[in-house]
Each structure stands twice: as C-alpha cells, then as structure tokens.
Amino acid sequence: MTALAHLDLDALGAALKQRGLDGWLIYDFHGINPVARRMLGPTGMLTRRLFLWLAAVGPPRLVVHRIDRPGVGEFPGEVQVYTTWQELHQALTDLTRGRRIAMETFAENAVPYLDLVPSGVVELLTRLGAKLVTSAPLVTEFTSRWSAAELDDHRTAAEAIATIARTTLARVVREPGRTDEHGVQQHVIARIREQGLTFDDPPIVAFGPNAADPHYSPDSASSRTLAEGDVVLVDLWARRSSDTVWADQTWMGVAGPTPPDDVRQVFEAVVAARDAAVDRLRRAVAGGERVTGAMLDTAARELLTDRGYGAYFGHRTGHSIDLELHGSGPHLDDFETHDVRELLPGVGFSVEPGVYLPGRFGVRSEINVVLGSTGPEVTPREPQRVLITG
C-alpha cells in the first residue's frame, strides 16, 4: 500500500479551504504520531524527524532525512530530502512562513491523544512564521474513519472474540476451585491465535475483587483461583492484521448457578448505562443533531449516578478505535477530558461503562460502535445482556 492511498486529496483540500487553512503539517519522530502512520501506511525504518505537508492547493510534500528516504518507498507527491538541521529549517520555512497550518496540537493538553507535537517543534515553527491551529477536526474526518474493508475486518474480529468470550466464560463459571486467572488468560490467548487474529498486550482476566481494578493483569505467581460466587471479567481485543482496525469487548460471568443480588444489580445498571449511550447517539442522528463523545459519556454517567453508582465509575465511557486500539478520533469522555469533537459517520469507538467496588468486585460491559450514515452499528451483533452463570 502506498502512502496516502486511502486519502481523498480533493476532499481534504476543500476542507482546508473551508477552515481558512493553507495546509496540514504532520510531524513524526520515532513513531510518536499515529496520524502519520495512518497517512504513510507501512514503512521501513524511520529514525529521523519527518514532516508531511498536505496543502489546500498543490501536491503533497514529504520532508524526510536522506537516511530515511528508502523507508518511505513510493510517495504520490514531492519528496524533499534534507541532511543537516539548516536544510531542515529552510525546508520548513519555505513550507510554513506566513501560513495558517493545522498540526496535532491541543490547547492545554485537553485531549492528550491529539497533543502530539513537542513544544520545541511548536516553538520552531512559530519562530519561522507559521500560525498553528489544532488538526482535531481533520483527524476525525480524514484519519479516524474506517474504510469499508476495515469495517468488514472489524465485524469478523468482533464476532470471533465474542464467541471466544462466551464459550470461555460458560466453561469457567462451572469450575470454582479448579481454575485460575492466569490459566484462563492463556486459554483466551490461544483461542485468539487459533482464529488467525493478532493482538499486542494480553487480555484481562479478573476474578472477584481483582475485577475492581480496571487494568488488572494476572501473572502466574499471584493468579487468583476462582471461588464460588466470584465475578469473572474477561476483556479481550484483537484484529485481523496489523494494518486494520481493532475489535474490543468486555464480558462478565459469575461462578455458580445464581449471581448474588448486588452483582446482578450492578450488572443491570452497567448494561443500562451502555445502552443509554447508544440510544442517545441514535436519537441524535435521527434528529440531525451534532453529537460529541462528551454527550454520550454524560448519558451513561447520569444513568449510573441515578442508580447510586456514579462514585464508582472512575473512567471515561469509551475510546476511539482505529489503527490504534485507543485511537486518535473522538473519545466518549466528559470526565477525564472534555472531548467535544464531533462524531462523524465512519468513526468507530468503544462503549464500556463500569462500576468498581474496591475489595468486592467490578463489572464492565463493553461493545463497539461504528457510526453509519443512518445511525450506529453495534458489534458484536448480540451484545451481552445477562450474566453468564454456572
């Protein structure tokens, strides 16, 4: 795949003009900017500073160090090679002086997933005469949206990991005293690989009070053995290849035939909050309303607060999904950050409210959503609605 293969340059040029921008300057160094990866596609080794210029008028231009030039491969535009810092500064001066340009910055680090340009680069470009604004709306529109092929990949991965989660939980909840977190985690890993899927970090498997830690990870030395009445949380993520989008889900079970009343009540509240966020999105799309991730976070959070669990929901409702598991697009967040970026057709994200009662148990229910032109599509096709019990 060549650089910019997925990008509609005419549409981007029109969007830049509409916003009064001369161009979009994408900076990367040692892979710190996932937006650059999305634009350039697979590359060889890149070890020096790189700038990709996408102009409102004119061809794309890539400013790359001579050593890194072979790593970029074919590029559909002009390539300017530099060797010394003086040559780099001159190239940047020629590109940006007197121009209003978008970059991956965000005022006061309010959305850290899009505040990716080092302060020194901002200082340099400002000194060279550029006026910088955030690229946030461009990232949503041109890099966070899924292609049709990526949506197909996501659906395949989503159904596969849902099946893995259901079948694993159905077995595990019947085995109190005979299974432990680390062993279940290794089973899930093997099943993901059997499906031909790939992942980076291992899945989360947490029993009982360990499920109250949202990022708990078992190891062989401290792995908890399942006890009767324990909640079982399985959080797993995977994708079909390293250059497509992810699927990410959390499923819940309880060891034994009947869930304790407090676990059942929390689970029902979490599922209702999850569905409240999706329903809020459906109503907004049907009414032609501009909708943001913050609005959906509020919908889920208000429901859990009304049920008496608001103090135990300590993270955002969801995150963007693209080539990164936690992507660069809008997050469902008015808690950790105030994310007022608009959700546009084609963007995908998780919806995963949770309630965490320290020392007792935690419950999270996670689905994924891609926003279509007529409304949200939820994956997997059959989200969890009842606890899986033994």
Image (tube, rainbow, N blue to C red):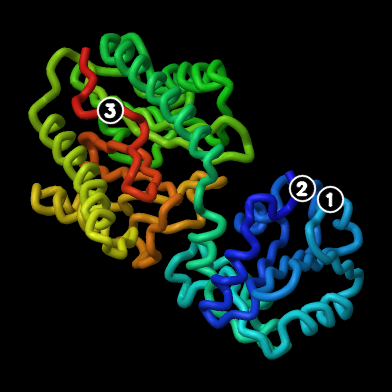
Estimate the x, y position of residue 365 in percent, counting from the top left: 28, 36
Q: On the picture, is 197 further left or further right than 36?
A: left
Q: Marks 1 and 2: CB-CB under 8 Å?
A: yes
Estimate the x, y position of residue 158 in percent, counting from the top left: 43, 30
Residue at which label 3 appears: 252
Q: Secondary structure at mark 2?
A: loop
Q: On the picture, is 2 further left or further right than 289?
A: right
Q: Marks 2 and 3: CB-CB under 8 Å?
A: no
Q: Secondary structure at mark 3?
A: strand
Q: Is residue 147 above or below residue 310?
A: above
Disc 1 marks which amino acid?
Gly
Q: What residue sits 69% from the left and 55% below the top?
A: 4
Q: Which label lies toward us, 1 or 3?
A: 1
Q: What residue sits 47% from the left and 16% below the top?
A: 187
- Report if residue 157 is visible in the image: yes
Q: What residue sits 39% from the left and 37% below the top?
A: 216
Q: Quadrant of the N terminus?
A: top right
Distance from Cα at disc 2 to Cα at disc 3: 39 Å
Q: Secondary structure at mark 1?
A: loop
Q: Marks 1 and 3: CB-CB under 8 Å?
A: no
Q: Which label lies toward us, 2 or 3?
A: 2
Residue at which label 2 appears: 43
